[in-house]
Image: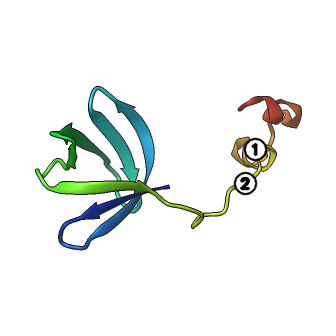
């Protein structure tokens, strides 16, 4: 999980979708839209031109084993033996 800290104290949580060409795209929790941030002079800048700090959450969200995750994303009715090979 990624935390995005704004200078006014607001903290958003999200999942990293893409990183490249000095841009990062994040699926922000509670938002229907994907947010994009740019790297400008070694600082991440939001779409509203606010400087933010990006950090990965450390140990705050429990991780699932790959087998549990793969089983969870396969809809019922599909052949279950395929699930371990998804990731």
The number of numbered badges drawn on the structure is 2
Q: Dividing the image into 4 quarters, which one contains the C terminus?
A: top right
Q: Residue furthest left?
A: 49
Spatial CA span between label 2 and label 1: 6 Å
Query: Residue at 23% across / 56% down in the picture?
Result: 52
Query: Residue at 78% across / 45% down in the picture?
Result: 71
Read off the residue under disc 2.
64
Query: Residue at 28% across / 35% down in the picture?
Result: 23
Q: Nearer the viewer, residue 31 or 50?
A: 50
Look at the numbered disc 1 and give the secondary structure of its residue. Answer: helix
Left or right: 60, with 4 as reference point: right
Read off the residue under disc 1.
66
Q: Position of residue 19 (x, y in %)?
A: 38, 33
Examine the image and state in which quarter residue 10 appears: bottom left
Mark 1 packing: few (<14 Cα in 10 Å), some, or many (20+)? some
Look at the numbered disc 2 and give the secondary structure of its residue. Answer: loop
Left or right: 17, with 58 as reference point: left
Label pair 2/1, CB-CB below 8 angstroms: yes
Examine the image and state in which quarter residue 62 appears: bottom right
Q: Position of residue 8 (x, y in %)?
A: 18, 72
Q: Nearer the viewer, residue 23 or 28?
A: 23
Colour scheme: rainbow
Q: Residue furthest top?
A: 21
Q: Position of residue 59 (x, y in %)?
A: 60, 64
């Amino acid at each position: 999980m990624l935390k995005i800290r704004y200078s006014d104290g607001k903290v958003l949580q999200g999942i990293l979708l893409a990183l490249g060409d000095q841009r990062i795209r994040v699926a922000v929790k509670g938002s229907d839209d994907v947010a994009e941030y740019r790297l400008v002079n070694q600082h991440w800048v939001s779409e509203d031109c606010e400087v933010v700090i990006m950090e990965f959450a450390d140990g705050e969200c429990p991780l699932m084993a790959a087998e549990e995750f793969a089983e969870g994303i396969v809809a019922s009715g599909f052949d279950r033996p395929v699930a371990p090979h998804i990731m």
